[in-house]
Amino acid sequence: MTASQSTDDCDGLIDKLSRERFERFDLALARITQVAATILRVDRVSIWFFSHEFRRLNRVQTYPTLDAGPDRETFSLDVSLRPEYSQKLASDSVFRMADSAHLSARQGDDFSAYLRKLEVHALLDAAIVIDDELAGVLCHEHNQPRAWTDTERDYARRLAEIAATAITVERRRSSTALGQRFRLLVERSVDAIAMASAQGVLEYLNPAARALLGLARDEPLLGQPLTDFLHPSNRERMLRSVFPTARENGSWTGRVRLITRQSELFEATVVFNVYRGGDGEIEYMGCTIRDLSQQIDVERRVAEVHARYEATLAQSGDSLFQIDTCTLSVNAADSQFEHLLGYSPNRQTTLTLYDLSEELPEDVHARVLRTLEDGHLLCGERRLRHADGGWVDVEMSMIRIDTEAGEGVSVRIRDIRELVRRRQETEHLAYYDPLTGLANNNLLRERADAMLAASLSTGRGVGFILLQIDRWQRIFDIQGYQIAESLIRQAGTRVKKAFAGHEVTLARVLGGVEIGILFDAGKETEADLVDIAHAAFSELFRADGDALQMNVRSGSAKAPLHAVNFKDLTKRAGIALRTAHRRRLAHCSYDPTQSSRIHDEHLLEEDLRQAIGTPELMLRYQPIRTAAQEDRWFAVEALLRWNHPKLGALPPSDFIPLAEESRLIIALDWAVLEHAMRAAAAWQGKLADTMLSVNISAITLMNGDLSSLVQDALQTSGLAPERLCLEVTETAIMLDRVRAAERLRVVHALGVCIALDDFGTGYSSLAYLKDLPVDVLKIDRDFVRGIGTDKRDERAIKTVIELGHDLGLTVLAEGVETRAQLDWLVAMDIDFVQGFHIGLPMMNDDLQHTPPALDTWN
């Protein structure tokens, strides 16, 4: 500030700016940069937006305005080589640089090149944060070295907050302008869609278009013409021929060479559509852009569908008919059409595809247009209206054909009512008990996992009550199998009726005589549910004409008070149930004192808290080697052991669940990671390039700052990122797959390997792996144990290896304990092996002096 420019003057300017309202977003940004330049007395002020992956900064506003000069073309900067820049903005909201001469040189660094080109010596950049997310930066550039004061830093922050407010207002204004239908059909479209004025000025780009053309999420278009994204080689042709043709005919489709915001060339198929108002004048233009690679895939699929279509024409049960592309009226229907849908030839003359479909008319019309555009469309399973008003399940596909009147569409439908019925029955059997109609263990687990995952973020409790018929074995022995089944069926009917209107999941647990009641503790009370459950058994049951009294006992547990996963929740409800039996109580709630000493949270939690960071917690390292190379270790896995001063050596299974429940697991994971990485960084000789594999818990993955933890450990230990592999369990990822994938991608971007541990014990599906940054699959030891004795285990291992390799993943088998298991796995083309046969867990000093050897188990 100058002598004439007091603090009060600056505060007044900022307060006035915060109260100003602008009709246009660009005017708001221009005003903000102008005031910032006045207050902070800098040579230049600019506003930049981060790209969605935080690798680039795109400039959207500069004051003074740049009309010419060497920096005119510097609209986008790659800041990936300066991670400390975005980290500083995220942590402190301000990045200060007094003299660019102190900035370290990095080859290929856009950031440094920009400063040199504009002769910028000092920077004061303030983070623009929206909804707790770093969205952009307000940059103050000075051409002389300058030490920024705390007052100037505060001014920059306040101005950045005003910019964030302007962006927020603009987002809200834009969001209001877009209707729900537009968001559903356009915002979520995988196609890149643009809208422009009648003069060709861009007014809207959907997210796919912004990503394809290289624009940031909130980057304003500022009257940018559509032609700016045309490659110069075909810009003249588009202006001279294509655009006039589209305006005259209403549309144009063809291949065009385009360029991104960063001047990267790509070829695409473009569809221009011109929309006119009631007066015939052009109101706006729509443009759909598809990358040529996608078009090639579409053409391949068209060829495949054509081949399948020709092969299925002769199959019985299919019906073929044609529709008019304008009115969508049905014509040229075969005899099977009447048999399947019940419409006589006379009624078919007035029938349209709109009449048959349960979808909205605009959706039906869109399918026909898509068919004409792509040549075919697999509509999948649909329901068509029968002549009697009911619905018929069909599999439907459309294909473009040439008719005497021009282009038409042929529709094939296949009756799949029986298939749908059988599938519904199969799905019902997969999730419901056939005897009682209650949920089975599969559905109970899925719902419990979903509720438990939600409870981690919402803090709402989840309760589980386990109900068991008392003295059931005696009843079974006296009444026999058939009467016992009838009694279980009656019990299921009673509890369903008793809990009607309550938000609970009732399940027959493991097909036995226990009934599980899963509930949201925020909506239902345990005491009320227990009373309802016991009251359902108060009346006599019928046993082959005789009356029979059946009593029940129950036990309950709650999450996260007693457990954080489904297994422990049901286990502790079972402990409470056994306590109720032992004490002859009707109901008992779980209490940690009911568990054995080794599982008593109150006794062990404080011991574990004190043990973290002490020699009580020890690491053992188990070798992992390449299957085909017997004399070399590829990696070692760090395994944690606890030498309790009173209880002796404890395996992880005895204290890791406790650490997860008490949230000590985050500190425990950090201690293990830091200790193991320090040890690995010091390895020499045969271990110099050996990878280190460390397990990370679900709590740390979903709630801890995993990326910061790993970055700090890498920096502290000096271990190269490519030598570190983090193991996460399949169940941990499936608690919240989207959130887990986001966190793992950040760590994976550091160069760290990601392994999926215990694969096959949870969801046993490779379908979701394509969305995860996974490098290694670890086949669980339960499958390896069955080699040579269980063909099902062998088939499962072979399938995982083959599909894993197809997805480009490395596959590791753990629990290899015999030579026979190793030989079989090598024959199946396994990549890596681990187990007692490969190497026993050992101390770090022993690891350095133990040569790789076979048959260590023996």
Image (cartoon, grey):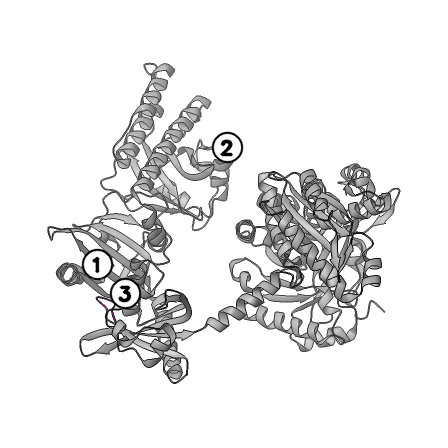
In the rendered structure, which amino acid carries the disc numbered 1?
Answer: Asn
Let me know if residue 329 is in the magenta part: yes
Can residue 513 be seen at all in this image of the molecule? no
Give the camera-side residue of 498 and 5.
498
- Name the residue carrying label 2: 92
**Which residue is labeled 1 in the image?**
273
Mark 3 — residue? 369
Task: Please report whichever mark, 1 or 2, sits nearer to the chain's N-terminal start.
Answer: 2
Disc 1 to disc 2, how far (Cα)? 48 Å
What is the x, y in percent for residue 326?
21, 66
Q: Residue 485 magenta-drawn?
A: no
- Residue closer to the observer: 141 or 372: 372
Please tell me how crowded label 1 is: few (under 14), some (14-19), or many (20+) other residues with Cα within 10 Å: many
Picture quarter with the N terminus: top left
Q: Quadrant of residue 711?
A: top right
| Other residues around mark 3 within 10 Å, as few (<14) / some (14–19) / many (≥20) | some
Compare residues 379 and 836 and report the one nearer the observer: 379
> Quarter-wise, where is residue 136 in the image?
top left
Please give the name of the residue rendered at 61% of the width and 60% of the height, measured from the top-left corner.
431
Where residue 63 appears, x then y in whole percent? 28, 33
Q: Is residue 807 left or right of residue 588?
A: left
Left or right of 251, for residue 220: right
> Secondary structure beneath disc 1?
strand
Is any part of residue 317 visible from this angle? yes
- Are circles 2 and 3 on residues that touch, CB within 8 Å? no
Q: Quadrant of the C terminus?
A: bottom right
Residue that extends furthest to the front in the rendered view of this protein: 545
Q: Residue at x 73, y 59 (%)?
A: 487
Earlier-in-chain disc, 2 versus 3: 2
Magenta span of residues: 325-330
Task: Determine the secondary structure under disc 2.
Answer: helix
Q: Main secondary structure of the magenta part?
A: loop
